[in-house]
Image (spheres, rainbow, N blue to C red):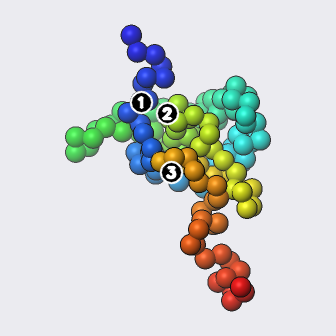
Amino acid sequence: MPTSSDLWRGVVPPYRMLDPGLLLAETVLSETLTELCARLPDERSASRLLNQALRSTGAVPQLTGRDGRWRVAVAGSDPHAAATTAVAVLVAAGGWGRIKRCARCGVPFIDRTNGASRRTCVGHAPGRPTERSRMGYK
């Protein structure tokens, strides 16, 4: 009999299946992600917060199929429900280590890289122009 951790083995980095929900999470769940980062490494406390967020959004995940591919989708139009569900699936599949704070500015972000090696938010990604460089400063 498979264990609950075996259920998510098919969800592997870079988590492309979850990308729409995780990108949404970085936008609409900034307060929740900040609080999750503050509670980690206490995973039990973080899980209580995430479960509370799932309940408060009324998230109802459903399995949907299209073009021979299956995905977990969230019924309804509440973006918070879809984003919270994506974060929960990510944690179930890859653990809490993918919810991080930017090493440069402290903004929470979700690391979807293969090796969970990202250290900075999108605004500080290598090769991406910063606000200062766009304004002509070196």
**Mark 2 vs 3, N-terminal side:** 2
In the rendered image, residue 116, in percent from the top left (x then y), is placed at 55, 46
Which residue, given by chain and number where applicable, does mark 3 sit on?
Answer: 113
**Picture quarter with the N terminus:** top left
Q: Nearer the viewer, residue 45 or 120?
A: 120
Residue type indicated by callout 2: Ala
Q: Residues within 10 Å of mark 1 (few under 14, many from 20)?
A: few
User: In this view of the protein, which residue sits in the foreground, 115 or 125?
Assistant: 115
- Per the rendering, the mark at residue 87 is none
Q: Give the residue displayed 48% in from the left and 23% down from the top.
A: 5
Residue tagged 2 = 93
Mark 3 lies on a secondary structure that is: loop
The location of residue 85, given as percent across then percent down, is: 52, 37
Question: Which of the 4 image quarters holds residue 123?
Answer: bottom right
Residue highlighted by disc 1: 9
Query: 10 Å neighbourhood of mark 2: few (<14), some, or many (≥20)?
Result: some
Secondary-structure class at tag 1: loop
* Residue 67 appears anywhere in the view: yes
| Marks 2 and 1 in Cβ contact (< 8 Å) | yes
Disc 3 residue type (three-letter): Thr
The residue drawn where x is 46% and y is 16% is: 3
